[in-house]
Amino acid sequence: MSKKFAPIIIANWKMNGLLLDSMQKFKQIRNNIQEGLVGCEIVICPPFTLLRDMAEKIPGTGVKLGGQNCHHEGNGAFTGEISANMLKDMICEYVILGHSERRTNLNEGSELVNKKATISHNEGLSTIICVGETMYERNNELAKVVIREQVLHSLPQSSNINNTIIAYEPVWAIGTGETPTLEQIEEMHDYIEDVVASELPKFGGNVRVIYGGSINSKNSAAILNIKNVAGLLVGRASLDVDEFWRIIETVS
Ligand code: PGA
């Protein structure tokens, strides 16, 4: 099915990977790219510690780099934090913000995500803003209320079709092996598109909504085939290069 944008496949390595092993994986991905035809945009979001080495090897591969988070201030006395311009310095083009693991474990709310997205946009980074409901919220007919609140409060004024992707990641699907039905994914992507079209005029009725949560090579083709799924955010399956490559081949 033809879509408005080439699909984007984003690997979220989370807090996984030491230098030698990760660079080996990255080399394998680069080799695969050289050998095959790639029909999608590929973004890898490794831990911060790997960015520098990967940045050195990335030019010419077609792969793009992303951070998994950034701070909402530009620089200063924020021990342990990473700024958007540091990501830019490591030739990152993307940053994941508002991942449910941060919303839940670190209490990050949509207002904070909004500030992080603003500074990321100012630095020229594209933001991948994650939204998603818990199973409790879904079972209590609250999923759309929660998603609407997260979309409208997390996306800053600076957001537009060129610098923002929304990742729909149901919290209950992340790392569990469970996924929503294809109909449930389509319905929620439709809903997110409607919210953006009616309340965020800067998008001009266009928005890229990608799906994340227990993606693997067995379910990726069917999910990518849904008319309004613009790409995939892949966690665990992206740590296994062969499996990740089978997902990439879904669109090649
Ligand atoms: P998962 O993670 O693919 O391991 O479910 C997805 C994510 O958290 O982005």
Image: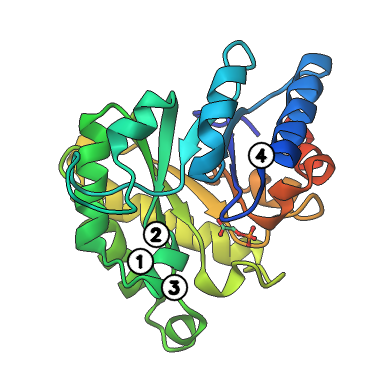
- Vertical relation: 172 (above or below) 243: below
Q: Which amino acid type corresponds to the residue marked 3 in the rendered image?
A: Glu
Q: Nearer the viewer, residue 198 or 78?
A: 78
If you read the primary sequence from the N terminus, does the residue marked by circle 2 or circle 4 appear first? 4
Tag 2: residue type? Tyr
Residue 28, quarter of the rendered image: top right
Quarter of the view holding residue 43: top right
Mark 3: C-beta under 8 Å from nearest atom of ligand 1: no
Residue highlighted by disc 4: 19
Give the mark, 1 or 2, whose residue is nearer the N terminus.
1
Q: In the shown orientation, is residue 193 left or right of residue 170?
A: left
Dots 2 and 4: beta carbons under 8 Å?
A: no
In primary-sequence order, the first of circles 1 and 3 is: 3
Instruction: Give the residue at mark 3.
Output: 133
Location of residue 22 in the rendering, given as x and y in whole percent from the top left corner = 70, 39
Q: CA distance from mark 2 to mark 4?
A: 41 Å
Q: Residue at x 42, y 56 (%)?
A: 130
Residue drawn at the location 63% of the way across and 53% of the way down:
16
Q: Earlier in the sequence, mark 2 or mark 3?
A: 3
Kindly indicate the quadrant of the structure image that contains residue 235.
bottom right
Q: Where is residue 39 shown, x and y percent of the image? A: 68, 24
Instruction: Give the number of the mark in front: 2 or 3.
Output: 3
Task: Find out whether the residues at labels 1 and 2 contact each other: C-beta distance under 8 Å.
Answer: yes
Q: Which residue is mark 2?
A: 191
Q: What amino acid type is highlighted by mark number 1?
A: Ile
Q: Residue at x 51, y 47 (%)?
A: 210
Q: Which mark is residue 147?
A: 1
Q: Is mark 1 within 8 Å of ligand 1?
A: no
Task: Name the one closer to the observer, 145 or 20.
Answer: 20
Q: Earlier in the sequence, mark 1 or mark 4?
A: 4
